[in-house]
Image (tube, rainbow, N blue to C red):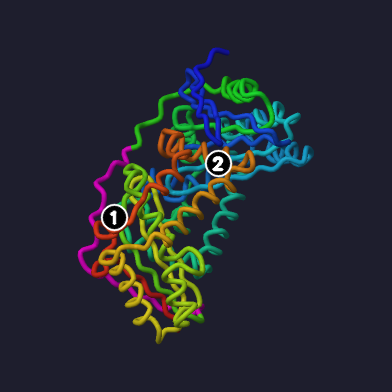
Amino acid sequence: MTSTLLNFPRLNAPKLHILPSGLTIVAEQMPTEAVNLNLWVKVGSAVESDGINGMAHFLEHMIFKGSERLTSGEFERQIEERGAVTNAATSQDYTHYYVTTAPKDFAELAPLQIDIVTNASIPDKAFETERLVVLEEIRRSDDNPRRRTFQRAMEMAFDQLPYRRSVLGPETVISQLKPQQMRDFHAMWYQPQSMRAAVVGNLPVEELIEIVAEGFTKKDPITPPEQHLEITQELPFTEIVRREYVDETLTQARLVMVWRVPGLIKLGETYALDVLAGILGHGRTSRLVRDLREERGLVSSVSVSNMTQRLQGTFYISAHCAVENLPAVESAIAHQISRLQTQIIVPAEIERVRKRVANRFIFGNETPSDRAGLYGYYQSMVGDLEPAFDYPNHIQAQNATDLMQASQKYLSPDAYGVVVMKPA
């Protein structure tokens, strides 16, 4: 096989190969007795209309129900017989499937994984059976206070973008879906041009590429439609927008504060926000944890995330506290946001986050599964591996001025969305 291989001389050294069908393969040999194949499909709940919301996740379940080549249960049987593992996950922007095998079993098992993903048969009987499983998953999610709170917060954060909808979809939609709708959805989106394969493990790179490429040769590609998701990003909040709910299952109140921030399509603007999230809420010495939990005991927990979806992100602060502490907690969080804009962050705080990120990057590169997931995510969502390797350097490069400017631009102490969930 002829191949133009791009080398990245770092801790990571994957090689890139693009098939005539449009499939991108990222491969790396790693001296550990396992091989992981990650198949990433650039399709999640964000491409769905309201009328089929939840289809991508439901299809993830149905992928494992077999193909023309493999009857239902055959793939799992062969995986289990060889002590391999497989699983999948669906998000708003992607769906990914993975299998981890011993190197000696990879040439036999990888084509089976590729076959069920690309040639899913979606039989009527299995569809009806699995619909019940998915509906039960939706009910469990609805019964989970953390997920309920998160869904309310996403509905607050986005008025128009599809990130406001649940990945699982509503029960009313899932109960009405038809098998042929799913077959059409699969045929439209599960095409080589919409997929990325990342494979890492203890086999020569050319062999890894050859095995994966061979698995895709039996697929006659069609051209999937363009993903028309370049919707105008939603504007920042201009005031405090508040929504309160009563949740009888709670014993403590839950407070979520959200800001609209850049997504992956403005990747360079996300790094400072990642550092600010670390300064505010990662670890016992972070500002909010130390102030609200350790020193004043106002909350039982507080967390901060800079959630970076493809089109637009969400800066997300969540706290659990007694109802009577809600005003003080919200005020304290707003005060800490204000401090970011008016007081220079001391070098020691920045350095703590830098070390944490550098160590997590190293620890997150230790297994074939770690690396294949990293490569698949960046190649699929960003279209480039360089930002994956450069992430620690981008974090190291953030200085106090960068952080202050980012907080002033994106994190207003006087304009945000707030969701409060109170116990009855």
- Is label 1 in a helix, a strand or a loop? helix
From the image, tell me which residue sits under label 2.
Answer: 373
Q: Which residue does the numbered mark 1 point to in the structure image?
A: 401
Q: Nearer the viewer, residue 282 or 371?
A: 282
Residue 423 seen from this side: no
Q: Is residue 339 magenta?
A: no
Residue at image location 47% in from the left, 59% down from the top:
352
x, y (%) of residue 132?
Answer: 58, 55
- In depth, the one of 379 and 332 nearer the eye is 332
Q: Position of residue 191 (x, y in %)?
A: 48, 29
Task: Pinpoint residue 243: horizontal percent, then vertical percent.
Answer: 32, 72
Q: Is residue 405 above or below residue 16?
A: below
Image-based side of 29 in relation to 404, left or right: right
Residue shown at 30% from the left, 53% from the top: 402
Task: Residue 125: give x, y in percent of width and height.
Answer: 62, 44
| Residue 41 visible at all | yes
Outermost residue on the bottom side: it is 324
Q: CA distance from mark 2 to mark 1?
A: 33 Å
Query: What's the residue type where badge 2 is placed?
Result: Gly
- Residues in magenta? 228-250
Disc 2: CA contacts within 10 A as few (<14), some (14-19) or many (>=20): many
- Furthest residue toward top: 2
Q: Secondary structure at mark 2?
A: helix
Q: Residues within 10 Å of mark 1 (few under 14, many from 20)?
A: few
The answer to which image quadrant residue 217 occupies is: top right
Where the C terminus falls, by quadrant?
Answer: bottom left
Q: Hey, which residue is sitting farthest right in the picture?
A: 81
